[in-house]
Image (cartoon, rainbow, N blue to C red):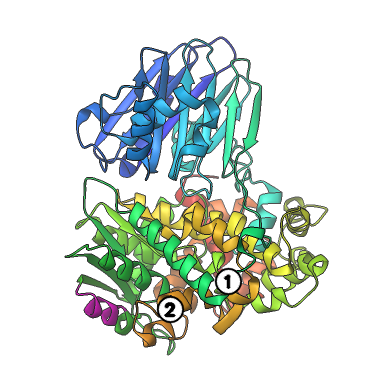
């Protein structure tokens, strides 16, 4: 796991190596173990390294295959790198390291842009062909590893984080009204290729982009599972699906044990992370380190789930660590979390993950976590309502159930020049859901949830918060083969038992029943949800700042009404409306955007 950056010129000029160096230095937290720069012709690359596989300096990046003239930088982990290395050796390739980076390099040499189909893992990659000047950018199937882009006439820059691009300078930081509409509609989710900044885009998941020396580009989407019932599974009953899901998850967990450093688990005490602990124990991992975080209660709302995480830790004899955060620390902890965000994220989980990652990084460099299970296996409470309509009615039902607010309501929230004349969020959902390959209403909803909302909400959040402390997070529930299997699973098996029914059946073979059947939990941060004193004052200070007053994004009367009753305004899905707008303004100020 690392951070990468680069610049490509199309105007005959040399790349700005100083700008690439600034981007690389801004990525230091993602890769505290090494720094490298490379430049040739019209391209420059930068890299920060976190040593996980092949800890020797031979595996440093940027890495070059001098024999064929190929250089790459790579962020992520290829879990099947050993198997791929053996296959490539049989095809005549020689290896100088035991790193997965060199496997990526040789795989491109062997298969060209088709190399991504052979990789099992999470990755963002930039490769340069010396002789042609062609640059190839690629991102993993579920978008676990980020890749941001900033284009200007004559050049393209890219980096693992948006703040790294800002460090290089020359970025158009005006707000994108369509992206802002998405942010206000979908709890801060802005799907690729947009970001809230007009001058920054991101490579979509499962995409290979070829950038030619003259600046022309073309994309190839290399993976999209079918959300339909498939012939090969036609004879499977509920027990067959249970066993198939458990087998695929066991493989996913085993794959994510790879590395030359110990692997821990972020243990919330919920079904998903507890199941990962059970499977790791089943793989014979002893002395497993597990980590949980909790917050001080506010307004009668409990802020931790320690009884459940302790229960699991005792059951599997883990080396368990707890972190309890008082409410008066949340407002100061917020500053660090917002600084780590590549994009504004309203979920309270961000603060929790950032604080927990700080502590975990002192113990281990790699953790497995349970993100993705709810989207992949229909675990959220709103999915039954989404499933209860005909296939063609799903876009309207999705907007009714999932959206924070309708388009019409934004007219009284946003300044006129910030409000698109059409409803881009509803249009996006309609377009996405109308694509073939989703059989039922729930299939269409879960495809959107897994390949859009999941990528640019919890997945991005976990990457940003963990990597800010040089901690690599791995998500078994986002193993692409497990996602393919779940996509084909009959909706009724996923919706059963209040959601994630097939996963709960699998879990009962390994976990205590009270862990499986407990009410669904989450990472609660009551101080934010209820705008506790220190957080409320922090928000007031943000809106009193000159940058906020001069920005002209929100109507003054709307902000005034929120500040008058900080805990009195909720979105359609129950989120604090003040927090949503305050987080955006806080993020903009934190990153020096005026």
Q: Which mark is residue 156?
A: none
Residue 311 is covered by the magenta coloring: yes
Part of the protein shown in magenta = 309-317
Quote the CA–CA distance across marks 2 and 1. 26 Å
Q: Which mark is residue 378?
A: 1
Residue under the point 40% across and 27% down: 105
Compared with 303, 410 (above or below) is: above
Compared with 594, 562 (above or below) is: below
Q: Quadrant of the C terminus?
A: top right
Is residue 510 something one can see in this rendering? yes
Kindly identify which residue carries mark 2. Answer: 526
Residue under the point 24% across and 61% down: 359
Q: Give the SS element for disc 1.
A: loop
User: In the rendering, at what x and y percent does residue 29 appear?
Assistant: 31, 44
Q: Is residue 60 left or right of residue 231?
A: left
Compared with 578, 53 (above or below) is: above
Q: Is residue 339 left or right of residue 172?
A: left
User: For mark 2, does the 10 Å Cα neighbourhood hold few (<14), some (14 to 19), or many (20 or more) residues?
Assistant: many
Q: Give the SS element for disc 2.
A: helix
Magenta part mainly helix, strand or loop?
helix
User: For mark 1, does the 10 Å Cα neighbourhood hold few (<14), some (14 to 19), or many (20 or more) residues?
Assistant: many
User: In the rendering, at what x and y percent does residue 241 appear?
Assistant: 53, 70
């Amino acid at each position: 796991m690392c951070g990468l950056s680069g610049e490509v010129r199309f105007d005959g000029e040399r790349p700005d190596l100083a700008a690439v160096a600034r981007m690389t230095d801004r990525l230091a937290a993602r890769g505290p173990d090494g720094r490298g720069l490379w430049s040739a012709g019209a391209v420059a690359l930068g890299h920060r390294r976190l040593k996980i596989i092949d800890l020797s300096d031979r595996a440093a990046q940027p890495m070059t295959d001098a024999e064929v003239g190929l250089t790459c930088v790579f962020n992520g982990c290829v879990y099947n790198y050993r198997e791929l290395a053996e296959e490539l050796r049989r095809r005549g390739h020689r290896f100088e390291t035991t790193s997965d980076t060199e496997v990526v390099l040789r795989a491109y040499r062997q298969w060209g842009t088709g190399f991504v189909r052979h990789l099992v893992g999470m990755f963002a990659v930039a490769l340069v062909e010396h002789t042609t000047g062609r640059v190839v950018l690629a991102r993993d199937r579920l978008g676990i590893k980020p890749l941001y882009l900033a284009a200007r006439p004559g050049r393209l820059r890219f980096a693992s984080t948006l703040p790294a691009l800002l460090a290089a300078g020359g970025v158009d930081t005006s707000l994108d009204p369509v992206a802002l509409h998405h942010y206000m509609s979908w709890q801060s989710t802005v799907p690729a290729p947009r970001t809230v900044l007009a001058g920054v885009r991101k490579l979509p998941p499962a995409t290979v982009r070829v950038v030619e020396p003259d600046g022309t580009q073309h994309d190839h989407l290399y993976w999209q599972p079918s959300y339909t019932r498939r012939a090969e599974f036609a004879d499977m009953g509920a027990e067959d699906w249970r066993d198939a899901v458990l087998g695929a998850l066991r493989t996913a967990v085993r794959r994510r044990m790879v590395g030359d450093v110990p692997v821990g688990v972020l243990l919330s005490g919920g079904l998903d992370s507890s199941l990962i602990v059970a499977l790791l124990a089943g793989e014979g991992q002893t002395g497993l380190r597990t980590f949980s975080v909790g917050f001080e209660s506010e307004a009668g709302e409990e802020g931790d789930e320690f009884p459940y995480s302790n229960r699991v830790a005792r059951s599997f004899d883990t080396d368990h660590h707890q972190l309890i955060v008082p409410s008066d620390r949340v407002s100061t902890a917020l500053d660090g979390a917002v600084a780590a965000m590549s994009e504004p994220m309203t979920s309270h989980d961000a603060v929790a993950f950032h604080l927990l990652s700080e502590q975990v990084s002192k113990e281990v460099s790699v953790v497995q976590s349970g993100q993705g299970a709810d989207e992949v296996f229909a675990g959220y409470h709103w999915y039954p309502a989404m499933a209860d309509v005909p296939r063609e009615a799903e876009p309207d039902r999705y907007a009714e159930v999932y959206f924070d607010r309708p388009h019409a309501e934004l007219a009284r929230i946003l300044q006129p020049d910030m409000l698109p004349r059409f409803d881009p969020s509803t249009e996006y959902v309609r377009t996405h859901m109308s694509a073939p390959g989703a059989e039922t209403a729930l299939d269409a909803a879960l495809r959107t949830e897994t390949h859009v909302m999941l990528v640019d909400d919890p997945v991005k959040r976990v990457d940003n918060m963990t990597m800010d402390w040089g901690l690599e997070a791995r998500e078994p529930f986002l193993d692409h083969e497990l996602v393919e299997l779940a996509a084909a699973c009959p909706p009724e098996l996923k919706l059963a038992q209040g959601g994630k029914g097939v996963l709960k059946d699998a879990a009962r073979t390994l976990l205590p029943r009270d862990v499986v059947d407990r009410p669904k939990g989450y990472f609660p941060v009551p101080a934010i949800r209820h705008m506790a004193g220190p957080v409320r004052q922090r928000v007031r200070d943000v809106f009193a700042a000159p940058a906020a007053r001069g920005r002209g994004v929100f109507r003054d009367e709307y902000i005034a009404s929120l500040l008058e009753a900080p805990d009195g305004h909720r979105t359609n899905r129950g989120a604090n409306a003040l927090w949503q707008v305050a987080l955006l303004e806080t993020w903009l100020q934190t990153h020096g955007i005026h």
